[in-house]
Image: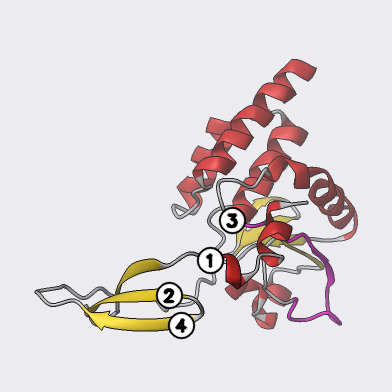
Amino acid sequence: MSFLGDIESFSQTNLKKVDTQVTTAAGKRLVETRSDGSFSQKTVEGKSMGFVCDTKPDFQVLEVRPGVLLGSQDVAANLELLQKHHVTHILNVATGIVNFFPNQFIYKTVEILDVPETDITGYFAECFQFIDAAKATGKVLVHCNAGVSRSPSVVIAYLMSTEGVSLGAILDELRGERPAVRPNDGFMKCLEEYERRLKDKK
């Protein structure tokens, strides 16, 4: 069973008591306690600082290669923007993000959990197949939630596979255009191992 499947089948009755410290957007600190199905919240005394939530939508569309675009779920939910960039196919590698315009675009959903424990290399083959098919007839947007970890990892691996470009080179290229690109630590290890496998094949 996949890691995602393990989480979906997990029962709340197996959870242990845990205290979690939370800081609200206004800077208020709370301790939340969950135990035996109950939930309580207690304010932590003392000075605390607020922080600013970034609620602005991310409408950056990065055309990494002709026909291959990278973005966030905000792009995937913006019909005008998708049409402006002549998108015909959408590869959704997020978890729990709906396909917004099923009648206007050809979709493929590959749910990938953005945690270091996920072996993202196991998803590459079906993602690459969809990207290749999309490029043959149009343009494909690859997106996850924030366009930071999952979708960049898929695009990076695709270019490593099709162009023989190094992991470091493509990371630098993407971050030059989209500084937020940051595959999680587990994905980075997977990409490093994938690069070694590609070199061994040569």
Q: Label 2 to label 3, Cα distance in Å?
A: 24 Å
**Where residue 85 sits: x, y (%)?**
69, 68
In the rendered structure, which disc, 1 or 4, sits on the residue that comes first in sequence?
A: 1
Question: Does the residue at mark 4 contact the one at mark 3 (Cβ under 8 Å)?
Answer: no
Q: Residue at x 75, y 76 (%)?
A: 99
Q: Amino acid at mark 2?
A: Arg
Residue 64 higher or lower than 146, as above or below:
above
Dot label at residue 34:
2
Q: Label 1 to label 4, Cα distance in Å?
A: 11 Å
Dot label at residue 114:
3
Question: Does the residue at mark 4 contact the one at mark 2 (Cβ under 8 Å)?
Answer: yes
Q: Which quadrant: the C terminus?
A: top right
In terms of secondary structure, where does tag 2 sit? strand
* Residue density around tag 3, few if under 14, some if 14–19, many if 20 or more, within 10 Å: many
In terms of secondary structure, where does tag 4 sit? strand
In the rendered structure, which disc, 2 or 3, sits on the residue that comes first in sequence?
A: 2
Q: Which residue is mark 1?
A: 15
Q: Label 4 to label 3, Cα distance in Å?
A: 28 Å
Dot label at residue 38:
4
Q: Amino acid at mark 1?
A: Leu
Left or right relative to 51: residue 16: right
**Where residue 22 sits: x, y (%)?**
31, 72
Residue 45 higher or lower than 125, as above or below:
below
- Please state which of the two labelled residues, at mark 3 or mark 1, is closer to the viewer: 1
- Please state which of the two labelled residues, at mark 2 or mark 3, is closer to the viewer: 2
In terms of secondary structure, where does tag 3 sit? loop
Q: Label 2 to label 1, Cα distance in Å?
A: 9 Å
Question: Does the residue at mark 2 contact the one at mark 1 (Cβ under 8 Å)?
Answer: yes
Q: Amino acid at mark 4?
A: Ser
